[in-house]
Image: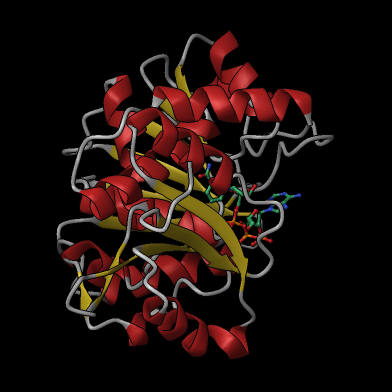
Amino acid sequence: MITSKTKVLGLIGWPVDHSLSPIMHNAALADSGIDAIYAALPVEVENLHEAVRGLRAVGYLGLNVTIPHKLGVVELMDELTPLARAVGAVNTIKFTSEGKIIGHNTDVVGVTQPLIDAGLQFEGAAVVVLGAGGAGRSAAAACALAGARKVTVLNRTAEKARAITEEFQRSDAFPDSVQWEAGSLAAARDWTGIDAVLQMTSLGLKGNTETPIDPSLLPASCFVLEAVYAPMQTPFLAASRAKGLRAVDGLAMLIEQGAASLEFWFERRIERSAMRTALAEFLEHR
Ligand code: NAP
């Protein structure tokens, strides 16, 4: 029951009407017995400052932040957690009881934790990120922060991949020892020695049957992470699984960053299973 004590959380972005976050967060809150609700809040760029301060003023406990605000909210934070500072982007905001605004980033664990759970050891790994949009950028940063030895970013538009790796090479947020490489998705390459491939392009979204690379060329020991979650089984995942690779779906990434946000707000462990059940049911019936 929603009472006057119920805490309120929300997602700010533009647009937010296709977001799955309210579904998985409200399922997790109910499953965990936490007296809070989560809403999607459309906020245009010109209203960002007013919205964040206003939501603090009306007693929101915290916010998730999505496109196009992940960079724009950084300057509004009173404090950044070390992860948010390293990535330079905020996807989770906490309003403290003293009125402070703390910015955090759970996109990083959204990428790394599902692969670690599947058995990947990032320390010393050679990883390839396919895509250089928002997801590709944060996946590349996440792998380097998790200890990868070599991070290669491949993109249809190779210059975008190069811009990211050159920026990260110069940044002091990552160890100097990380080897950064960039290239074109279309170029033929030798996949020997690659420990993980992270599919961060939008290829494979419902109705699209293309794969950015042919997973049958990957080494048998390679791990695969897919970003796209609708459909849950993309052509890239299907081909990876057919080859016998250890493959993690896009829902795992979505759920992990969401659960990590809830854990940041409530400082307690959140079970992931209710989130997956709610999302799978929604995606199956929509
Ligand atoms: P974005 O910033 O728009 O970037 C799109 C990326 O896909 C770019 O690298 C783009 O290459 C590439 N791409 C698009 N069409 C292509 C094609 N026909 N052939 C080859 N490459 C193509 O999007 P984003 O925010 O990075 O998101 C990418 C995907 O990840 C989306 O499907 C999104 O839903 C998903 N995602 C999932 C999660 C999750 O939690 N599971 C989180 C974030 C994003 P160019 O640069 O050459 O255009």
Is residue 134 depicted above or below 128 in this figure? below
Give residue 261's position: percent from left, percent from top: 34, 51
Give residue 3's position: percent from left, percent from top: 44, 51
Give residue 271's position: percent from left, percent from top: 32, 28
Q: Residue extending furthest right?
A: 207
Q: Quadrant of the C terminus?
A: top right
Residue ID at (49%, 60%): 10
Image side of residue 120 versus residue 280, left or right: left
Image side of residue 90 versus residue 184, left or right: left
Give residue 180's position: percent from left, percent from top: 33, 58
Image side of residue 5 versus residue 247, left or right: left
Is residue 142 depicted above or below 57 in this figure? above
Q: Is residue 211 visible?
A: yes
Is residue 42 depicted above or below 120 in this figure? below
Residue ID at (56%, 47%): 22
Is residue 123 depicted above or below 154 in this figure? above
Tally of marks: 0
Colour pattern: secondary structure
Task: Tell me the quarter of the picture where residue 124 sits.
Answer: top left
